[in-house]
Image (cartoon, rainbow, N blue to C red):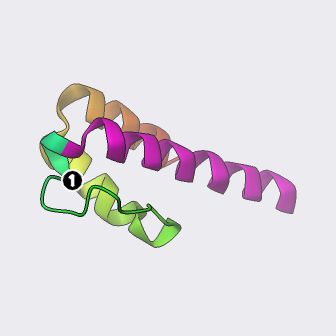
Amino acid sequence: MTHEISEGRQRRLELARLAFKEFYAQCFWSSDPEHVVEETDLPWIIRNLRLHGGHRGYRIVAELCR
């Protein structure tokens, strides 16, 4: 069970990192472009994707919230 939780966290973190890069200009432009997304950044990533990410951002948020 712990291994499953760890894999899920790792998958969400990787998705958040990809989303940060893909949506940087649209959602995260005021942040450092070299910022390394950590697990504590997930609420911030989710909030900005919901506000500024459009339909695709919303779909990514659905994956991040699983």
Secondary structure that dominates the magenta span = helix
Crowd tier of the residue under label 1, counting other residues whose Cα lies within 10 Å: few below 14, some 14–19, many 20 or above? some
Q: Is residue 27 above or below residue 42?
A: above
Q: Is residue 49 left or right of residue 63?
A: left
Q: Is residue 66 left or right of residue 46?
A: right
Q: Position of residue 37 (x, y in %)?
A: 44, 61
Q: Is residue 8 magenta?
A: yes
Q: Name the residue carrying label 1.
A: 48
Name, please, the residue furthest toward the top: 55
Residue drawn at x 25%, y 39% as measured from the top left = 23
Q: Position of residue 46 (x, y in %)?
A: 32, 53
Residue drawn at x 55%, y 46% as measured from the top left = 14
Residue 1 in view of the camera: no
The amino acid type of the residue labelled 1 equals Asn
Residue drawn at x 25%, y 57% as measured from the top left = 47
Number of numbered discs on residues: 1
Mark 1, secondary structure of its residue: helix
Magenta highlight range: 1-24
Q: Quadrant of the N terminus?
A: bottom right
Residue 54 in view of the camera: yes
Observer-nearest of 25 and 44: 25
Quadrant of residue 3 in the image?
bottom right
Q: Position of residue 5 (x, y in %)?
A: 74, 57
Q: Is residue 22 left or right of residue 39?
A: left
Q: Is residue 15 magenta?
A: yes
Q: Position of residue 63 (x, y in %)?
A: 48, 39
Q: Is residue 58 above or below residue 40?
A: above
Name, please, the residue furthest toward the bottom: 40
